Image (cartoon, rainbow, N blue to C red):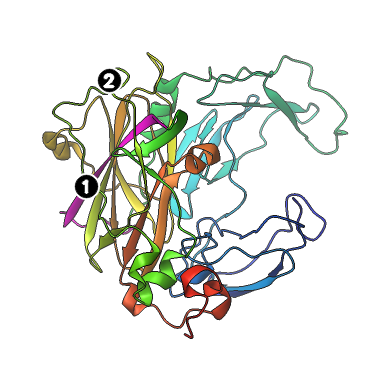
Amino acid sequence: MGINGQFPGPTIRAKAGDTIVVELTNRLHTEGVVIHWHGIRQIGTPWADGTASISQCAINPGESFEYRFKVDRVGLYSKPFRWTGEPQNHKMVVVEADGNYVEPFEVEDMDIYSGQSYSILLTTNQNPTFNYWISVGVRGREPKTPQALAILNYIPNPASQLPTSQPPLTPQWNDYNHSKVFANKIFALIGSPQPPKTHDRRIILLNTQNTINGFTKWALNNISLTLPPTPYLGSIKYGIHEAFDQKIPPDNYDDANYDIFNPALNPNSTFGNGVYTIKFKNTVDLILQNANALAKNVSEIHPWHLHGHDFWVLGYGEGKFRDEDEKKFNLENPPLRNTAVIFPYGWTALRFVANNPGVWAFHCHIEPHLHMGMGVVFAEGVRRVGKIPRAALACGLTASVNP
């Protein structure tokens, strides 16, 4: 799918504080569309987040929707991809992650998962008469193709001049120790905001692969997310309770009896579309707990993305999260991110402040996993949300609402 005849779509360059206005017209014949502005927190404009059934109605064929929002900080916000890059004979210095400055650190290759972004500094300090390979490999999934190659072109050499040596090999797709070493090098730049020292609420989300009616699904605390026809933002703001399940999803799972290292004895799960309602300005800890999938000895890696917020990555751990693991949290200089990975058979601890009124998705950024139910929805301070544009309400039970 192209935008203005391009794929990927055109780049939007802006300064912090600028207001972006994009009118999206759907010229497809059958599919509804939205655009999610990945990494933009949409402070004051939650209806512009671009999440169908959560922040707005899908834009149907022939319809248009105006996205208007403010860019509140610097950063690179682009089409997410999964990448391990290694420029031959060159070091890279990482200076920014997901729009937040980090303490600079040097690496030979980058470990990037879907939804993440980095800014790096690369010094062209090698022999200028040569070009150099850049190797790109897949992480977390066994590749069926060889690693991709690009050329670091030293001017005035022609780009067609191939390097004379063999390209560097990227780490193995399942070398998670390599990934953990990279993740544990990331610390917030001195002077960055620190997290609150305590939390008001803790939500532990058990990530599992399940079956429903014979179909493979993903679930959190045994609930596989299905989105309702009426967007949450409008239905919550205008009190339309029948629009979605009013049963509150669980904050935990039966950790005393669940074996994360083996397939579940009962893999059956249930569909649900309930919402985690969070008190405005509360501090929330999110513990992502990984587990074995349906097949034995399989635990997949999952990059988790939070809309509307950044969170502090307080730490990673092996095995099952315990209360005493909180003592290991980094509260001094944890990095601020909007996407963090959970490693196989491990846990990841995140902390965020619910200070952005709206309804926000929190989900695995591997798109098939999301469509198979691997996500939850947070609602905070919705009564504080301003007038929602009519076009964001024009479906389901909010179609007759006059905002």
Q: Amino acid at mark 2?
A: Leu
Residue in view at x 54 percent, y 72 percent: 392
Name above or below for residue 284 compared with residue 317.
below
Residue 22 seen: no
Name above or below for residue 235 compared with residue 165.
below
Q: Amino acid at mark 1?
A: Asp
Dividing the picture into quadrants, the one containing residue 330 is top left
Is disc 1 surrounded by few (<14), some (14 to 19) or many (20+) residues within 10 Å?
some
Was residue 210 drawn as part of the magenta stretch in this picture? Answer: yes
* Residue matched to label 1: 251
Query: Which residue is more in the foreground, 109 or 111?
Result: 111
- Name, please, the residue furthest toward the front: 213
Query: Which residue is more in the foreground, 34 or 147?
Result: 34
Residue 35 at what x, y percent from top left? Answer: 61, 60
Was residue 68 drawn as part of the magenta stretch in this picture? Answer: no
Tell me the distance, in whole angstroms, between the alpha carbons under discs 2 and 1: 22 Å
* Residue matched to label 2: 265
- Name, please, the residue furthest toward the bottom: 402
- Who comes first in sequence, dot 2 or dot 1? 1
Q: For numbered disc 1, what is the local secondary structure?
A: loop
Residue 47 seen: yes
Residue 13's disc number: none
Q: For numbered disc 2, what is the local secondary structure?
A: loop
- Name, please, the residue furthest toward the left: 324
On the rendered structure, is 21 left or right of 390?
right
Is disc 2 surrounded by few (<14), some (14 to 19) or many (20+) residues within 10 Å?
few
Query: Which residue is more in the foreground, 132 or 256?
Result: 256
Q: Across the whole image, how many numbered discs are drawn on residues?
A: 2
Q: Which residues are magenta?
A: 191-212
Residue in view at x 62 percent, y 49 percent: 79
